[in-house]
Amino acid sequence: MATVLYIESSPRKARSHSIAVATAFLEAYRASHEGDTIEKLDLWNTDLPAFDGAMLEAKYAIMHGQPHTPEQADAWRRVTSMFQQFQSADKYVFSLPMWNFGIPYRLKQYIDIITQPGLAFSFSPSEGYKGLVTGKPAVVIYASGGIYSEGSGAESFDLQKPYMKLWLSFIGFTDIHALVVEGTLQGPDVAAKNQAQAIEQAKRLAQVV
């Protein structure tokens, strides 16, 4: 049995295209993986600590081989707790809208908290950076108001998909699947058509991930 961690980063809920596709994926996944467990992490209803002050200094203490002060140690426990929740999953599903050509700030904050030396990655002069979250698949569901796919002429504006792929690869993922809903602001007919296509792709992908 596997545990799937579903990370939701849109606050629009019932009006969210990315959540609609994620819901279809997870329903199809449950039907074909009856023994698996799905855990949901709603980033808009999660207490995400600010990554500053003692928490930031705790990170640099680790990077420079220095001991933590009591305040830094307490802050670092919050980091490790969130990372352990993330690492404990066997499979991952992310749903995210495009905000200002990138990702929502709550998702970026979560990424900044868990992407830490000795947890998500390591570094040595001989090996460089090495991702430590390995051997696990990730499904990333993207939604955007515009159309940024190859051939659109607007590819350079898309900082959403390249960032997520870079981050996941950096921390060790190699099995990354993308589901995309584009043109959600191109009118209701275009939005409905593109969402329906993404949902059909999601249902098929759920059978094999």
Image: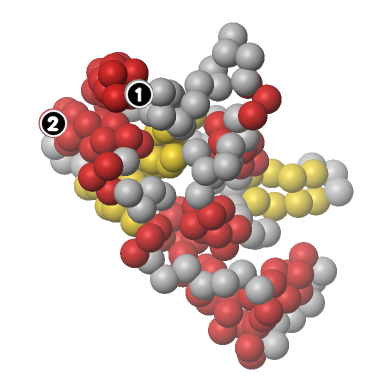
For marks 2 and 1, the one nearer the N-term is 2
Q: Position of residue 201 (x, y in %)?
A: 31, 18
Three-letter code, disc 2: Ala
Residue that carries the numbered disc 1 in the rendered image: 187
| Residue for point 23% across, 45% down | 14
**Compared with residue 91, is residue 195 higher up or lower down, i.e. above or below?**
above
The circle drawn on residue 34 is none
Q: Quadrant of residue 17?
A: top left
Which residue appears farthest toward the bottom when viewing the image? 70
Q: Secondary structure at mark 2?
A: helix
| Residue for point 38% across, 66% down | 46
Residue 208 visible here? no
Q: Nearer the viewer, residue 16 or 86?
A: 16
| Residue for point 65% across, 51% down | 121
Q: Position of residue 47 (x, y in %)?
A: 42, 71
Q: Secondary structure at mark 1?
A: loop
Q: Is residue 100 left or right of residue 66?
A: left
User: Real-space Cα distance between discs 2 and 1?
Assistant: 33 Å
Image quadrant holding the C terminus, namely top left
Q: Nearer the viewer, residue 150 or 69?
A: 150
Q: Is residue 156 left or right of residue 190?
A: right
Residue that carries the numbered disc 2 in the rendered image: 31
Tell which tag, 2 or 1, sits nearer the viewer: 1
Q: Quadrant of residue 162?
A: top right
Residue 152 visible here? yes
Three-letter code, disc 1: Gly
Q: Position of residue 91 (x, y in %)?
A: 37, 40
Q: Nearer the viewer, residue 98 or 163?
A: 98
Mark 1 burial class by Cα count in 10 Å: few <14, some 14-19, many 20+: few
Mark 2 burial class by Cα count in 10 Å: few <14, some 14-19, many 20+: few
